[in-house]
Structure formats: structure tokens, C-alpha cells
Image (cartoon, helix red, strand yellow):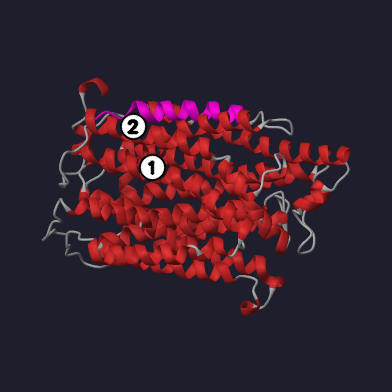
Amino acid sequence: MAQATQAPTRPNIRVVLFSLMIAMMLAMLDNMIVSTALPRIVGEFGGLDHFTWVVTAYVLGTTVSTPIWGKLGDLFGRKPIFLTSVVIFLLGSALCGMAGSRLLGGPDDGMAELIAFRAVQGLGAGGLMVGVLAIIGDLVPPRERGRYQGMIAGIMAIALVAGPLVGGFITDHLSWRWAFYVNLPLGGAALVLLVATLRLPRHRTEHRIDWLGAALLAVGITAIVLITTWGGNEYAWRSPQIVGLIVLALASLAAFGVVERRAVEPVLPLSLFANRNFALISVIGFLLGFAMYGAMSFLPLYQQTVQGASATESGLLLLPLMFGMLVVSLLVGRTITRTGRYRAFPIIGGVVMSAAMVLLTRLDAQTDVVESSLYLLVLGVGMGFLMQTTMLIAQNSVDQRDLGAASGAATFFRSIGGSFGISLFGAVFASRLSDSPAGGIFGGGEAGTAMDLVKLRELPETLRELVLGGLADAVSHVFLWALLFTLVVPVFAWLIREIPLRTENISVPAGEAERQRPDVDR
């Protein structure tokens, strides 16, 4: 059993928090920076039909590694594991910046190299995301955690917009490669600050890592993502490739369940899901990631093609989303800290996000910037109610000794939802686009010919309007599918029980948290 022998001093929290925010910004900022650079990357390497894999590989790497990083932090200590994840992320960033260069063989293999290196980046990013949340969970008790997690949500909101804005500026004035190289000085600063300031409780734990469970989980999740990406697109649903992947996914996940029940230190403890709130929040996190990451990947594409924005301007057009998410996240965090109540927020967030998806299905070739900005503001407000509230509920539902595993599992389900969402919506977008006038022009081609924005602007007016209409229709269709998932969020959120937030970071007997809930919620 782990036993804490040294506690951190309270005055250290503010300094550590600043360092953690830099690290969190790394993972969040990078994914958003790349979104505005993607049209240029596709223009250089070609292959619009594979462009979502630049995002999917990153999210998949994050998803597969998240529960592993969480468990490793529980076993070996959060600081060394967290710093290791930062180093891996920076290595992946450097390799992504060199993809398709003469150093690695030239542009012919550029897209394949970039996708592979994005997976390496994602492996490191999984440790960044879960590490920040678990470290704050070590330092701050749940009752006070709302304020700090509201700040994290604020940082995430800034990254959601600052990423595309910075990425657009870099793409317009330097090169898309600097969208990855910019991580290196920022990450170096984070490493120095964390080494100097991060002080956590020391734990004595027997180190037993569930490598078999981790491998089975990785195989199963990867197979499912390939099914959602290739099914009906690269291969027919009844083809041997898809059927084989389905069999592989089912067998791997079934074996994973058996292994986890017998493992001494399971990478994803199935006992956590016996807790009602944790199980519900896991489902909500999956749906949130599915709708949010999947749909938002297509906003810069819409802005740069249909609305004619530059890469920099498409970042600016996301400012309303950032504003809504930032303001609401901070207000919700402070309200939870003051009142200790949280159940209403995920319900409201699910309703508002669904309303935003309904509005976004109205996007077409005639939608002006003001109208689309209002839609994004509504989406940001809905996300602000949900992002960190879901993590707070997950952490408050489990014993302190399982904090890393719980944080990793909650982040895992949001990430896997995002991975599936990007894959599924990418297939939906490609299918819808191929049936439109835009499909023949932006359906792929040799390097340098796909997603040629200059070529688009040079088309005759009548043809250009047809192409823009096809692109807008494909993007709005993605939001229609996202709506199907956000509609279920408030239904599951309604079933959450209002369990009082702990005021100290102490371990309690199993099941005690459930017995502490008020009579009104029984």
C-alpha cells in the first residue's frame, strides 16, 4: 500500500500551478495550431482523403497512452513520469517539423512521416494531460479544486483559439513546420520550471505494471479507430479487412477485460466503474470528446475555404468560442468552490452544446462571419459548463490512492471519444464531399494539387459557388452527426448524484463516498 511520507507546502501551489499551465498549454496548443496549418500541409503533400489522420494519429496516441501514464504516476511518482512525457512530446514535435524534409527522405513520404510522428507526439501528450490533472489532485482537495480546475479550463479555452491564431500566423508568415518547432522553447521553459518548483508527496509502492493489459487495450482501441476510419471509405463494410479488424477489436477488448480482473495493478481498474458517478462521467466524457473534437476539426477548413479567411484570420474567427468557454469555466469553478454544488452544470452544458450544434448545422456558403461567430459563442458556453466539471466529479468519486488511475480513465474516455469522432466525421465528410461538385477538385491528387486555395479562388464564379456550396454542405453535415451525441449528454448528466466534495485529500473506505451523498439525491 502506498504511504505518503512528505506533503507539499501550500505556498508552493501557485508557482507549481503556473508551471503546470505551461505544460498543459503544450498539449492543447499544439493540436489547435496544427488545425489551421492542415490546408497548407495537404497542399504540399496532397491527399485530402487522409488529412484527418494527422489529427487522428495524435488523438489516438494520446488515448492509448493516457491510462498507462496515469497508472505509472501512481506507481513511480508523478514528477519523474510527468517530466518523461514532456521529453517525449518535444521529441515528437521536432520530428513532425522535419517530416517530408530532405533529412528524412523528401516530400514523397511526407504525409506518412507526419502521421507517424504525430502519434509519437500524442504518446507524450497523454502524459501531459493526465499528469497535470493528477498533480493538482495531489496538491488540492476536491472542495477547493473547482477554482483551480476552472483556471485549467480557462487555459484550455485560450489554447483552443490561441492555437489556431498562432498556427495561422506561423503558417502565413513562416512555414507550417514552425507550428511544431514552436513547442521546443516553450517545452524547454516548462521543463526547467517543473524541475525547480514541483514538490509532491513521496510514496512507497510496489511496482507492478500491467503491460499485457496496456498492450491489449492499445490493440483494441487502434482496431476500432481503423474500423471507423476505413469502413465504407477505404474498404467495404463486409470486406475481409474490416471484418478482420472487428474480430481483432472484440477479441482484444474481451481479453483486456479478463486480464484487468486478474491484474494486481490494472492499468484501467474495472472496479472504478462500480461507482455510479464515475461510470456516468466516463460516458459523458466519451460523448463530449466525440462531438467536440470531431466537429471542431472541420471549423478551420470551413473558414479558410468557404469563408475565404487566411490561416491567421481563421484563428481570430474562433475568438468567440474562447471567450464563451473562458468566462463560463472561471465562473463555474468559483461557484463550485463557494457552494460545493456541481450537478446542474453538466446538465446545462449538454443542453447548450446541443443548441450550438443545431445552429452549426445551418452553416452554408452564404453564412456571414457575424452569424457563425454567434454560433461559436454558444458552443464555447456549453463547453465551459462541461470541460473541467466532468473531471472534478470523476476525481471526487474515487479514493485518493486511485486518483491517477481515475484521472487517466476520465481523460482516456474523452480522448477515445475524440479519436472516434474525428475518424467517423472524417468518413462522413469525405463521403458527403465526394458526392458534391467539390469532390472532383478537393478529393486528393498528386502532391501540391490537393486543397489548392489559390486554384479555388481562380475558378469561374458559377463553378466556385457550386464548390463552396459542396464544402459547406459537407461541414454542416458533420455537425448534424455531432448533434446526435450531444443530445444524450444531459440525459446521463441528470442521473449524476450530488456527492459532497471532500475538503481534504485523504483515503476513505471503498464505497464511503457513495454513502456520503445527501438524502435528497437518493
| Number of numbered discs visible in the structure rendering | 2
Q: Is residue 477 visible?
A: yes
Side of 381 relative to 483 (left or right): left
Q: Residue at x 44, y 45 (%)?
A: 158
Task: Give the residue type that dot 1 points to.
Answer: Ala
The extreme top residue here reads 520
Residue 332 tag number: 2
Instruction: Give x and y (percent) for residue 453.
Output: 75, 51
Instruction: Give x and y (percent) for residue 510.
Output: 20, 43
Which quadrant: the N terminus?
Answer: bottom left
Task: Give the residue type that dot 2 points to.
Answer: Val
Instruction: Give x and y (percent) for residue 151.
Output: 33, 42
The image shows residue 294, relative to residue 106, as above or below, that is: above
- Structural crowding at the residue carrying mark 1, measured as other residues with C-alpha within 10 Å and reported as few (<14), some (14–19) or many (≥20): many
Residue 153 tag number: 1
Q: Are marks 1 and 2 in contact (CB under 8 Å)?
A: yes
Residue stretch rendered in magenta on the structure: 340-360
- Structural crowding at the residue carrying mark 2, measured as other residues with C-alpha within 10 Å and reported as few (<14), some (14–19) or many (≥20): many
Inspect the magenta stretch and tell me whether residue 233 lies in it.
Answer: no
Q: Residue at x 58, y 36 (%)?
A: 482
The residues tagged by marks 1 and 2 sit, at their Cα atoms, a distance apart of 10 Å
Side of 362 relative to 83 (left or right): right
Q: Residue at x 59, y 65 (%)?
A: 177
